[in-house]
Image (cartoon, coloured by chain):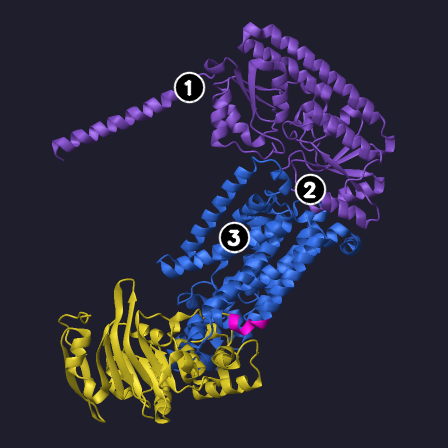
Amino acid sequence: MSEPAVRITDLTVAYGDRPVLWDIDLDVPAGHLMAIMGPNGAGKTTLIKAVLGLVAPAAGRVEIHGDVYAKQRHLVGYVPQRGSVDWDFPTTVLDVVMMGRYGALGWFKRPGRTERDQAMTALEKVGMTEFAGRQISALSGGQQQRVFLARALVQDAQVYFMDEPFQGVDVRTEKAIVELLKDLRDRGRTVVVVHHDLQTVRDYFDWITLLNVRRIASGPVSEVFTPENLGLTYGGRVEFLAEQDDSTDTVEPHFNPDGHGRGRP
Amino acid sequence: MIDLLTGLVTDYTLRTVALGSAALGLVSGALGAFAVLRRQSLLGDAVSHAALPGIVLAYMLTGARTPLVLVLGAALAGWAASLVVMLVTRTTRIKIDTALGLVLSTFFGLGLVLLSIVQRSSGAGQAGLDRFLFGQAAALVGDDLVTMTVLGALVLVALMLLWKEFKLLSFDPAFAGAMGLPVRLLDIGLTTLLVIAIVIGLQTVGVVLMSAMIVAPAAAARQWTDHLGRLVALSGFFGAVSGLTGAILSSLVPHLPTGPTIILVVTAVTILSLFLAPRRGLLAARVRKFRQRRQLQAERVLTDLYRLAAQHPEPAEAPHAVPVLRTMTSPSGVRRCLARLSDMGLAVPDPDGRWRLTPAGVDRARDILGGDA
Amino acid sequence: MSNPSRCRDWLLFTGLLALVVFTGCGQGDTPEAMDGKLRIVTTTGQVAEVARHVGGDRVSVTALMGPGIDPHLYKASAGDVERLRQADLILFNGLHLESKMGDVIGQLGARQPTLAIAGALPEAQLISPSNFPDSHDPHVWFDVALWSLTVAPVAEKLAQLDPEHADAYRQRADAYRAELAELHAYALAQFATIPANQRVLITAHDAFSYLGRAYGLEVRGLQGISTATEAGTADVKGLAEFIAARRIPALFVETSVSPRAIEAVRQAVKSRGFDVVLGGEVYSDALGDAGTPVGTYTGMVRHNVDTITAALKGESRHE
């Protein structure tokens, strides 16, 4: 795979005259598990939405594996934020997962046995098979997240985009999801995740993009995840406090509480 | 009663009005389910009210009094209103409920002004324009029935063909868009079906009351099912039954206007559903709460008995009297709780009136108290 | 605030105030000064007819409600109110015929001469609808003899306002009453030619009770006294049953009411195997177009009489 999984060129998105993303150039190489991080209002969700064609950019271009998104939809899977949906909607877990196959089914066709089986397989991967017939209103936060993940898995994509999948989710679910994502990465897929927790970056991701309206830095976590870059992204001073842990010498990033601001646009 | 049923088949007026009202109820109920799920209940209201200027303008421009022309005007105006709402919410910061309110009142106000102007011209009475405010169900004739059923059937067929697309659109439009579904087109499509459903009903229940036929059956049906297919079907069913019943009732009592009667019936159905539905109903919720509270009280008395007994060297041999229990966590209803515990086999009374735990009761108390035992 | 700008503000304010005051004052010029005629504004065309015949060329009469307009539903516009305010005399039907103008007329009546010509009729002669025993049916103009009793009070009112020409008004009133007496006799004669068992008049609303009483016809309307009510399914069904059972030859649409409900009744009667004919259009609450025979009260009554008689005798088919 010579071409990057995702190539973003000159992407600019503004709401009115307020710039949310400014002149983003970004290459995501295939086969990586990448985090997108930045402070609130940095444009992380907007970036995903612009890539998926849900938000119209003022300028810029997005290519998935060498071609425009519109032609490559079948290669892309999407996990939106949990809060973007009304969970009181009258439908079951299995039904939601099967929705991931609607694009492949085309117009007027009903989902049948094949789609059902595919959905059950995806539910198995996220450990939710016993919940297949359950109303989505009866699910916990972690379970809801897993259902959304299964819906994306059933799309059998090459590139996955996930918006804050660990938000409000219990520890066990979080660990299970990370294992799943790493597995996807190991099998050659590309996974792009909007993430919010600085503490877990080194454990979960191998690639990172730091964003604050502009692209601050992007590359392997080991190179890019530095105090200087974090300072540029989040404002204020960032210090790493070394914390001894039984197993390894993990370095946990920590904020210096003097001042936090936003990056300069 | 037999007369009534035979009347439904044999009497021209009753048959026509009843079938027309039932058709209206079926279609508006089915589409109303989607409107309600998409939080667009007010859209039905806005589109109905917005139809008024369309009707009056159609008359003013063509001078025609035939219902078909007027209803076409209604459809165009209702459709235009829904497009304006979409445009306003997409291009400005105005939220959808404000946009709907604005469009509703502006269009309806315009309609009333036009109506007032037109009523000064001769022949306006002949067009019966004011009848569109509250409908004139009793004036339905065979031709109207044909139009209503054909349009209604088309709408329902379209709904079934695009079922999964509409389901996804209603649940998660962002995901739908990412997957390549033409979200904007589908949105307009579903709204157009809603407009047609509304326009079918305007002659029967009128502009002002039509929104009830969109919203009430769906609200009622939501109380009874959690499955989308059943919801839409049940909503259509409630609408149809209300139409039918309203028509029948107004055929029994002179001077009872049919349209408003239908609305009263559907409202009654909704209120009953709100109260009586088994899981979501208010009554069921009350009963559930009541039972849970009783259970909790009984468990408190159980654990009280356990704690009291645990202070003695021989716990199982230590019965305690009711007054003692009353000093613990649950002062009221102790006897009742004890009776319940006895029924569950968790406690037994001694001949002298004091109560002790059974082995099962001891186990249960330990479970409840968990680590603190 | 500096002094010059405060001065300017006060000047503007007083200027504005003066403007408002003078505008208000400008509104009361008496129209009499303009062409010497008494300006009469009426509600319905029938009332205007009385005014025209009694007043002759001493008056200029305007009817707010033109041909084909339904007085039960008519709401006065700002222009109408202005016209009413500038009138020397307001004449209206009364008995709540102009139900949506009641407030307007009531308020104006406190300051201007008004007369409810039907309201001035002796109560004993009025019909009370069975379900509203405390009020009266306002459609009095269909009993020509009764209607002619409104002429004298109008003449007296005009005489009061314009004593100089009192005699002329009374003379014209007498002439008009004679004309109406002739009309009444005509109607009696015509209706008498309808066979007894076919003397039933079916129309869109209960406007013809007075006609029924005066000329010996049974009268039934689909809607009630006012067109503001809605006909229910039972009403349509009941009327259809009645028509089919009594084998009534014709029913009638009204010029100021939508024919849809009557059409529905007709279909219902047809389904019972009896073909009731649409006997034609009758004028109920309004006159016909100005400049035509049916634009006058006399012409309108004649048209009604002829149409009804012909249809009930089975001589006409208006499909």
Considering only order in the chain, which callout, 1 or 2, is on the residue closer to the N terminus? 1
| Residue that numbered label 2 is attached to | C259
Q: Is residue B88 magenta?
A: no
Determine the secondary structure under disc 2: loop
Residue at (32% x, 26% y) in the render: C20
Which of the numbered marks, if any, corresponds to residue B77? Answer: 3
Colour-to-chain, blue: B
| Residue that numbered label 1 is attached to | C28
Asked if residue C195 is positioned above or below residue B191 in the image, the reply reads above
Asked if residue B206 is positioned above or below residue C166 in the image, the reply reads below
Identify which amino acid the numbered label 1 is placed on: Gly
Colour-to-chain, yellow: A
Host chain of mark 1: C
Residue A108 in sight in this render: yes
Part of the protein shown in magenta? B161-166
Colour-to-chain, purple: C
Residue in the foreground of this view, choosing between A256 and A84: A84
